Amino acid sequence: MSPDLIWVESAGFPAPGVSHNKAEIKANLFDVLERDWAVFRYTLDVLIDGGEFVVGFGTYRGTHRVTQKNFEARAAHVWHVRDNLIDSFEQFADTEVIQRAAAEDPDKATVSS
């Protein structure tokens, strides 16, 4: 990864926001997912090599620790590669589906864009 990395998780995702290095990605994303979700995984279906841009399409699946609700949500990941290093990542996901799994009352799930 580039030292100038910008890693963006979608608003509405369980761990939204921007990280700038491996330690921040672990703390801001993976530690949060591990804490709140019994299962949270991404299965890559298609990877498109567009040169400096690489796009992956796949599906998130998971089970929330508290609600025990399962979800399945489609997502796209876009990486930008410069000098053979990933210098940016941006995630696009159906976050409403994920939020509904985390909400004890699905009608009160917070959905943000």
Image (cartoon, rainbow, N blue to C red):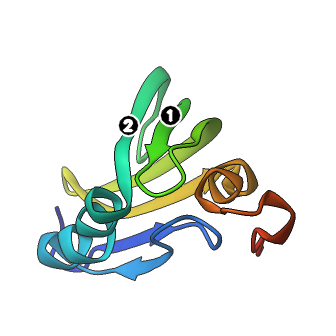
Residue 95 shows in the view: yes
Q: Where is residue 97 in the image (x, y as percent from the top left)?
A: 71, 48
Q: Residue at x 34, y 59 (%)?
A: 33
Three-letter residue code for mark 1: Arg
Is mark 2 in CB contact (under 8 Å) with mark 1?
A: yes
| Mark identifier at residue 70 | none
Tell me the crowding category of disc 2: few under 14, some 14 to 19, or many 20 or more residues within 10 angstroms, Cα based: few
In the displayed structure, does residue 29 sit left or right of residue 96? left
Question: Quadrant location of residue 6?
Answer: bottom left
Asked if residue 14 is positioned above or below residue 40 in the image, the reply reads below
Tag 1 or tag 2, which sits nearer the N-term? 2
The residue that label 2 is drawn on is: 41
Tell me the crowding category of disc 1: few under 14, some 14 to 19, or many 20 or more residues within 10 angstroms, Cα based: some
Circle 1 sits in a helix, a strand or a loop, which is it? Answer: strand
Q: Residue at x 34, y 45 (%)?
A: 38
Circle 2 sits in a helix, a strand or a loop, which is it? Answer: strand
* Quarter of the image where the C terminus is located: bottom right
Residue extending furthest toward the right: 107
The residue that label 1 is drawn on is: 61
Q: Where is residue 37 in the image (x, y as percent from the top left)?
A: 38, 53
